[in-house]
Amino acid sequence: MTLNEAQLGWVELAPEPAPATEPEAAPEAAREDGEDLSEDISSFKTVDDWESDATILLTRGDIFGALHIYEEILRVYPQYTKAWYNRAVILASYVKDFRGALWAYDQALAIEPKNPDVLHNKAKLLLDLGKYEEAERGFIKVLQQKPGYTKSLMGLAIAYVNTGKFDEAVRAINLAERARLTKDEKANLLGIKAIVLNNLGKSKQAVKVAKAALSMNPKDDSLWETMGIAYYNLKKFREAVRCLNRAIQMNPQNVTARQLKRDILDSLADLGITVHDEEPGL
């Protein structure tokens, strides 16, 4: 059983079979009538049973209980890639033990060095940790096997943006756009494209692309923030402040949008330019 993709972010996994053989049960000792057999019965659990138990524990919030089950699986089957993978997901997504998660991904890759799902998820974690060059190399390894893998193309584009490789980011985005995308994936991809266009000095195009993304996902604060930056680059300050206000409205914790709005208003005030803030209380 593979963990629910809702917990995995960008990961898509094909079902992986459990190991072909189960651990052999110890020889049964003679027992008298009426003796409790529950402990012996539990020893006959299959790997699928263990994984089902781990999933149930996760839904109940018993994170360390689920981890313990995977430790038991790996004690019996140390070469079971999916168990290392699921252990890494739990460590990263629930425990926030990123170092431990990276180590677990490496154990999985020691068994299957070219497993695209493990490579992708490790690269995504490296991306989230700000290790952009390592993430870039990881996504490239995935794409060498699966050239049209949209989620890795999107991850690679983000890595390129953060290392200043904007032309490369555009190429990755263009490849991703050829795929059949869900509405949310399309909006996310257009958001990345708008950021790239801003950095290439093509802010008019960035506004157009951000508007297209917002038509699909109008509650994404990062898209409003990106469009606000584009308007600021175009010296359309009223529109910039309006977009940043919308970003803050959608996500009051968006510190970047708040700071950018404050910087815009302060810098314009220093120049004697007054821009009406429609929502000064935000």
Image (cartoon, helix red, strand yellow):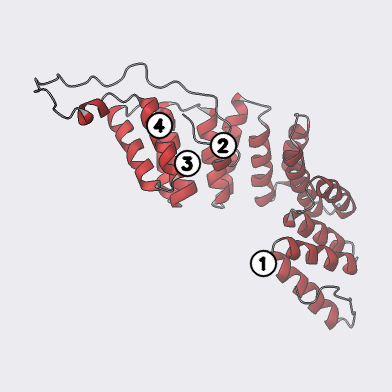
- Name the image quarter holding residue 70: top left
Identify the mark nearer the N-term, 4 or 1.
4
The amino acid beneath tag 2 is Glu
In this picture, residue 27 sits left or right of residue 100 = left
Query: Which residue matches tag 4?
Result: 51
In this view, which residue lies farthest toward the top? Answer: 20
Q: CA distance from mark 2 to mark 4?
A: 15 Å
Q: As shown in the figure, which amino acid type bears the numbered disc 3?
A: Val
| Mark identifier at residue 255 | 1
Residue, disc 3: 89
Q: Residue at x 89, y 79 (%)?
A: 274
Mark found first going from the N terminus, 2 or 1: 2
Above or below residue 197? Residue 234 is below
For marks 2 and 4 on the same chain, the one whose residue lies earlier in the sequence = 2
- Residues under labels 4 and 1: Cα distance? 40 Å
Q: CA–CA distance between discs 4 and 3?
A: 14 Å
Alpha-carbon distance for marks 1 and 3? 28 Å
Whether 63 is drawn above or below 121: the answer is below
